[in-house]
Image (spheres, rainbow, N blue to C red):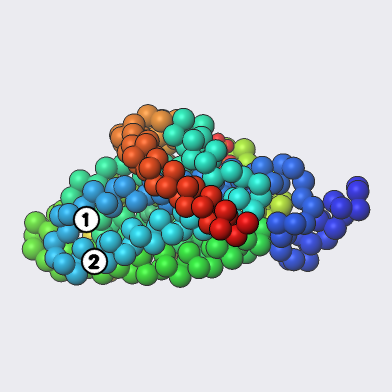
Amino acid sequence: MSSENACFEHKLENEIAIEPKDWMPEHYRKTLIRQIGQHAHSEIVGMLPEANWLTRAPSLRRKAVLLAKIQDEAGHGMYLYSAAETLGGDRADLYQKLLKGQMKYSSIFNYPTLNWADIGVVGWLVDGAAIVNQVALCRTSYGPYARAMVRICKEESFHQRQGYEAVTALANGSEEQRAMLQDAINRWWWPSLMMFGPNDSESPNSAQSMAWKIKRLSNDELRQKFIDNTVHQVEALGMTIPDPDLKWNEARGHYDHGEIDWEEFMQVIHGNGICNHERIQAKQRAWDEGAWVREAAIAHSNKQQKHVA
Ligand code: FAQ
């Protein structure tokens, strides 16, 4: 083992963060650019399903809160693209890979938001699942990613609470509102569980990412945590989870749950979900229509540099 590699391993073993200027194996760098890049894309694409309801929020207060949340997601995307840049990733290149379908983003954002209850459920369940994953990533071995996660988690926990507050209002509302909420839970429950990725036995990246402490808990461990956290929240709302196999397992100290539809998951991550095409089209349009902003920013920067010279 080279002395550089020994130093890298020593840092991992002793929980010392790997920083941008440190030596790191090429595969470690590439794995991080892949994961951080996909994570950034998820934040950016994830703005779309909620933005769909901005003009139809039921009150000014709900609208202001939703707008703030969506702006936070944009900020998260920016921190994450910056973290990928510290590894030599190129933001424009990552974005083009997203548009060409060469990089993934979270499967969850390929489902449609059909009514206002979906917005509450996205905040509660989707941000709730995101937090479970991201709290673990606050201890990821790459310093800039871990630090970005600390800030992001603070904002995500506000998102989760605003989602739960919104669904609580529906749960305490009319029969029609309660039915709308139950319908939204029925549609978002399974896709939320898919956010954690394939089962550990089917996850090609997990073993190496766990060894490098990029991932601190496995896909199945995180999914289990999310289920265990969420069941009593659903009960408190007086709603049900659309899984007849869900039951408390005293011996394991966890909830057992039914099998996820992995065929649906595979279809969605390979571009064939309900909204994949629409989401990429929206991001392509944003890229094309933003060309003048990029050109103006470059022209301004060139002018500033001339002044300095
Ligand atoms: N969707 O070997 P693994 C948010 C891919 S939170 C799409 O297990 P890995 C907040 C995976 O990339 C959502 N693709 O992979 C928000 C790999 O493909 P590749 C974002 C998935 O990386 C809320 C292949 O399957 N959070 O946005 C998914 O070790 C509300 C094999 O899988 C993060 O990205 C999936 N669900 O583990 C925003 C967290 N699952 O690249 C707006 C950071 C797996 O080999 C509104 N990421 N794949 O072709 C991670 O923790 C990990 O990357 C996992 C996947 C756990 C997602």
**Three-letter amino acid code at the position of disc 1:** Leu
Q: Is residue 140 left or right of residue 10?
A: left
- The label on residue 54 is 1
Residue 7, x across and y down, in percent: 85, 58
Label 2 secondary element: helix
Residue 3 percent coordinates (x, y): 91, 53
User: Which residue is found at the position 39% from the left and 47% from the top?
Assistant: 293
Front residue of this view, candidates 45 and 160: 45
Does the CB distance between marks 1 and 2 fall below 8 Å? no
For the residue carrying disc 2, how many other residues have a C-alpha within 10 Å: few (<14), some (14-19), or many (20+)?
A: few
What count of labels does the image hold?
2
Q: Is residue 244 above or below residue 103?
A: below
Q: Give 3 or 79, whichever is nearer the viewer.
A: 79
Horizontally, residue 95 falls left or right of residue 236, namely right
Depicted 44 relative to depicted 76: above or below:
above
Residue 179 point in image, percent of width and height? 14, 54
Residue 227 location, quadrant:
bottom left
Residue pictured at 57% horizontal, 53% vertical: 306
Is residue 67 in view from this perspective?
yes
* Mark 2: amino acid: Ala
Vertical order, 113 against 146 (above or below)? above
Whether residue 136 can be seen here: no
Name the image quarter holding residue 63.
bottom left
What residue do we see at 17% from left, 64% from top?
Answer: 170
Answer with left or right where residue 17 lies relative to residue 295.
right
Alpha-carbon span between mark 1 and mark 2: 9 Å
Q: Badge 2 is on which residue?
A: 64
Sequence-earlier tag: 1 or 2: 1
Identified at 44% across, 34% down, the residue is 99
